[in-house]
Amino acid sequence: MPGVSDVSSSTGPGSSVEPGAAAVMPMYTVQPYNSGDIKVELPSCMYTLPNLHQAPCGHHEQGGADPAVQALESRQEDILKRLYELKAAVDGLSKMIQTPDADLDVTDIIQANESATSASRKADLDSILGKDYGALRDIVINANPSVPPLSLLILHGLLCERYHVLSAVHTHSSVTNIPETLLKCFGDQVNKKSRQDYQLGFTLIWKDVPKPQMKFSIQNMCPIEGEGNIARFLFSLLGDTLSAVTATLIDSWVDTAIFQMRDGSSKEKAAVLRAMNSALGKTPWLVGNELTIADIVSWCAIQQSGNTTSVPANVLKWMKSCENLPSFNSVLKLLK
């Protein structure tokens, strides 16, 4: 048949077709690209990463360590160095705490400073404020009569003991019906001297202000506000020399008296009384053996808080010592 002859002839020479079977011819023939001697290593994972913990063999020979490893080692060394320095600092502090000098009471330091400076204390306005050959140094204070600044009145009395003070009380138009005791809180002022014979002027103006305000130099000074801040300024005019430790303790007691004893809650007031009782068990006054602004402001805060009866024993004894002083006794009359 013509079809069979075509197939057999297309197979070409050498092809054999079994009798009775159809001839099959492959479409494509591909030669092997390698011989059977070459072994091919197939991958066991999709991605491979270098080992950061251990350099591969021959890596150092190829040009040094991995930069990422070097950065990590450098960071670790820096952290270990800082930890070592912190440990050395902590060890040094622990040795300082364990030394006998660290067990010294602050009271001993204050008493030592007081004995060294008590002989050189002398009130001199020129050394404190500088020489002034012009007008009289005049302190002007605005205060609200509903909350009289008791500590400032006590400091006025102490200033009068050291200087020739020209005192005056005035009333601003913003307030009315001021008690007679407040109008005469400085006593009956009889000026028998001329103005230039006084060393200091002290003018109190009863005015409707939220908090006490003071000016020392009317033209050049911004007002000082707050009873505690004004009290600090007035106390500095007494000329007492204080060490850094003593001044810090005084400031702490002043803030505690105003913000916790006078304006704080009942729990805060009780805590302040306990702290005062503990401090007064060591020294006759809150800070050392002499009266300071800490005693003045704290005594006034107790009076203003209305907690004058239920106080500890040391505090009660201290309050009586304060009231025996003339400046405290004159203010105490205003509270009756």
Image (tube, rainbow, N blue to C red):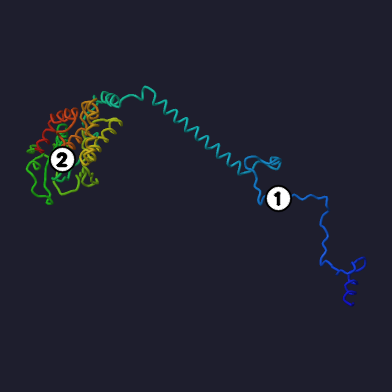
Residue found farthest to the front: 20
Residue at figure coordinates x 39%, y 23% from the top left = 99
Q: Position of residue 132 (x, y in %)?
A: 22, 39
Alpha carbons under labels 2 and 1: distance apart: 99 Å
Q: Is residue 91 visible?
A: yes
Left/right of residue 134 with respect to residue 35 in the rendered view:
left
Q: Residues within 10 Å of mark 2 (few under 14, many from 20)?
A: some
Left/right of residue 222 with respect to residue 1 in the rendered view:
left
Front residue of 209 and 275: 275
Mark toward the viewer: 2 or 1: 1
State the SS at label 1.
Answer: loop
Q: Which residue is mark 2?
A: 202
Q: Amino acid at mark 2?
A: Phe
Left/right of residue 197 with respect to residue 280 in the rendered view:
left
Q: Position of residue 107 (x, y in %)?
A: 28, 26
Q: Is residue 233 visible?
A: no
